[in-house]
Amino acid sequence: MIFLKKQSLADTKKLAEHLAGFLSAGDLILLRGNLGAGKTTFTRQLVHALSDDPDLIVNSPTFTILQQYTGHGLPFPVYHFDAYRLETIGAADQGFEDYIGADGLTLVEWPDYMKEILPDQYLEIAFSYDGQDRDVRLTAHGARYEKMLDRL
Ligand SMILES: Nc1ncnc2c1ncn2[C@@H]1O[C@H](COP(=O)(O)OP(=O)(O)O)[C@@H](O)[C@H]1O
Ligand SMILES: [Mg+2]
């Protein structure tokens, strides 16, 4: 577990740039934290760290649930989920399994709402914001991510 206190935008950008060097196709990152805690911002920073296109627009796929990024210098596709709208209907039978642990990096905001289709190995990044300070906690679930955090 890595706990980072009082993370500014510059701090999380640095973290995203550092983490980007350790990621491969098939990786899964679950992003936890309340509304406004910084999940989408970090995803944007991570996509920009992987891409060579600073103009690539990365927003939360609130209505579409899934946004895919390919090209733009990305070494592999990035699949960005915002599962919030699955709260009532769940994630089963939507075909989302195909995007997890496949040919790209998958990031999931509000992962509890699609937990029935998520594997048990992933990197968890929990954002907390109390109105003043923003803390970030990284937790590895599974050997691959334990090794990743050890090296980070
Ligand atoms: N580390 C940070 N420092 C300062 N502001 C931040 C930080 N992370 C996010 N923000 C700001 O907080 C707001 C909400 O962030 P967002 O990433 O959309 O949250 P979430 O996706 O968790 O709902 C945005 O205006 C964003 O610029
Ligand atoms: Mg968001």
Image: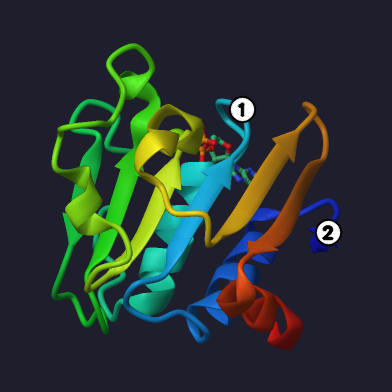
Labelled disc at residue 3: 2
Label 1 CB less than 8 angstroms from ligand 1: yes
Which residue is drawn at the image coordinates 14% and 42% (left, top)? 95
* Residue 134 coordinates in the image, percent (x, y): 76, 43
Where is 105 relative to 3, above or below?
below
Could you tell me if residue 8 is visible in this image?
Answer: yes
* Residue 3 coordinates in the image, percent (x, y): 83, 59
Q: Amino acid at mark 2?
A: Phe
Where, quadrant-wise, is the N terminus in this rendering? Answer: bottom right
* Residue 89 coordinates in the image, percent (x, y): 27, 16
In-image side of 49 versus 135 (left or right)? left
Where, quadrant-wise, is the C terminus in this rendering? Answer: bottom right
Q: Quadrant of residue 100?
A: bottom left
Looking at the rendered structure, the secondary structure element under dot 1 is loop
Q: Which residue is mark 1?
A: 34
In-image side of 89 versus 133 (left or right)? left
Q: Nearer the viewer, residue 119 or 1?
A: 119
> Pointer 1: residues within 10 angstroms few (<14), some, or many (20+)?
some
Question: Which mark is first along the chain, 2 or 1?
Answer: 2
Q: Amino acid at mark 1?
A: Asn
Which residue is drawn at the image coordinates 22% and 26% (left, top)? 63
Could you tell me if residue 59 is visible in this image?
Answer: no
Which residue is drawn at the image coordinates 38% and 17% (left, top)? 87
* Residue 36 coordinates in the image, percent (x, y): 57, 30
Which residue is drawn at the image coordinates 75% and 83% (left, top)? 150
Labelled disc at residue 11: none
Q: Nearer the viewer, residue 137 or 53?
A: 137
